[in-house]
Amino acid sequence: MNTRRNGLLGAAVVTLAFAACSSPSPPPPPPPSPSLEALAKAAARAIPGAVGLTSAPPVRPLTPAAQAGKQLFFDPRLSASGAQSCATCHDPAHAYAPANDLPVQMGGPHGTSPGLRAGPSLRYKEFTPRYADLLDNPDGISLPAPGGGFAWDGRADSLGEQAQAPLTAPFEMANEGPAAVVERLRASADSAAAFVRAFGAAALASTTVAFPKVQLALQSFQLEDPSFHPYTSKYDLYLYRKPGGALTPAEARGLKLFKDKDTGNCSGCHLSEASLDDGAPAQLTDYSFEAIGVPRNPQIPANRDRRYFDVGLCGPLREDHAHFPEFCGMFKTPTLRNVATRRTFFHNGVIHSLEQAVRFYNTRDTRPELWYPTVGGRPKARPDPDFPTYGLITVQYVGGTVQKFNDLPAAYRKNVDKQLPLDGRAAGTAPPMTEQQVNDLICFLRTLTDDYQPGGTPTAPGCES
């Protein structure tokens, strides 16, 4: 993709950041400030560690803009409650994802307002292209389709643009608008000092000047700081033939299954190789949007209203695609990096373990009664001994109708993707993967976890051979 390039991040961001925040003295006047999108493109030309991983990348000091962004990222005083920062929902100790297993996070003026979607990880966003209805797929094979952008519905085109949503959403940091953010920034001594060091005292003079620089600062931190894109998993060592990267037999079988179009077919949406056109490391996503019909999550308060549906690209948080029914139910494909550390899965957090997520893919169609509620049936007092216990539904029914795709209006169920392993095969038939293959695939997915230490990180039980 033309937004994914390699180069030197430090020089790019320093040059652009100071062009955006300072003016030469005496005249001539400074050049026009670049847009946040332009900054993102420039920064993505060389994220530290993103070029080949053949040697440890040099540790570059953060630019003043990124230093300010780091201070802002961890400052709860920028929220209406005074208790919530960006890091509250994006914990660096959990790959910048939530530290808990709540399906949605709590926020708002008093910290009691529930969100609408599960909190994503902020790692590995640096090569994300801007959203397009017809985005060229990086696999070089698939036809152009909706892809790119930030958030589950791709409604932001840069990390800086995306930052406005949590700062002002009523169920997150709950500022009434950019002016409230800037006012709280002025009142936060440490953040204001870092902001002035980066952009000058005049940058706090007005909202129209300050808020875009707040966005720039948060974006710069996420693009510059290596903790957002460390590329330190066992799989990275394997890809670049580094010491300690040898896969166990189970992990190797899992990788083969991951790529096999006739069984796992995970790489159909989660690209597992480095980019051929620009050498970007494997991102484990193709940035596409898919409808997979995950079960409705009754733990989300908004879902208590039976008329409410979250249909991704069609709303409710995105408003410009409401009249595109062919996109309804589609959500962005996340990276699978650090997937084994997740405590909630999919846009509504309805799944709570990696094993359960893999089994959903494997048996959504062949055993839908394990994932969706049954109406009109008679519950058994005691399930049969062979009734699986890994699903969301632990009660076995006799008769009745399974409410498959119960979180998607009937008119949009035709949008559900039907490529393996979610290929629409008949209920009661054999699933695409055997029990051994399910275990092998999970073993491979565990190699995508960062901070792997060869010789010091034990292989997960059951993944040795």
Image: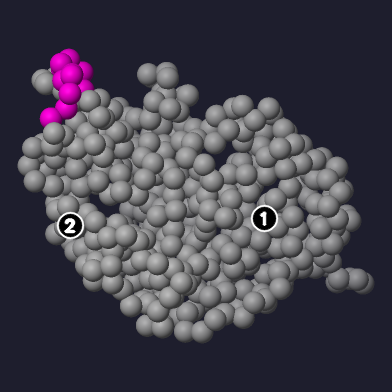
Instruction: Give SS at disc 1.
Output: helix
Magenta residues, start to end: 374-384
- Number of numbered discs present? 2
Q: Which residue is mark 1?
A: 218
Q: Is residue 220 visible?
A: yes
**x, y (%) of residue 209?**
79, 51
Above or below residue 432? Residue 247 is below
Q: Is residue 137 visible?
A: no
Using the rendered view, name the quadrant where residue 169 is placed: top right
Using the rendered view, name the quadrant where residue 300 is placed: top left
Q: Residue furthest right?
A: 26
301 vs 324, left or right, is right
Instruction: Give SS at disc 2.
Output: helix
Q: Which residue is mark 2?
A: 436
Residue nearer the viewer, 135 or 84:
84
Given the image, on which type of amino acid does mark 1 rest?
Leu
**x, y (%) of residue 81?**
72, 33
417 vs 278, left or right, is left
Q: Residues within 10 Å of mark 2 (few under 14, many from 20)?
A: few
**x, y (%) of residue 321?**
42, 38
Above or below residue 450? Residue 321 is above
In the rendered image, residue 220 lying in the magenta stretch gets the answer: no
**Gap in Å between the C-alphas at discs 1 and 2?**
44 Å
Main secondary structure along the magenta-highlighted residues: loop
195 vs 338, left or right, is right
- Name which residue lies at 80% across and 62% down: 198
Q: Residues within 10 Å of mark 1 (few under 14, many from 20)?
A: many
Given the image, on which type of amino acid does mark 2 rest?
Gln
Does label 1 or label 2 sit earlier along the sequence? Answer: 1
- Name which residue lies at 44% across and 49% down: 342
The chosen color scheme is: one colour
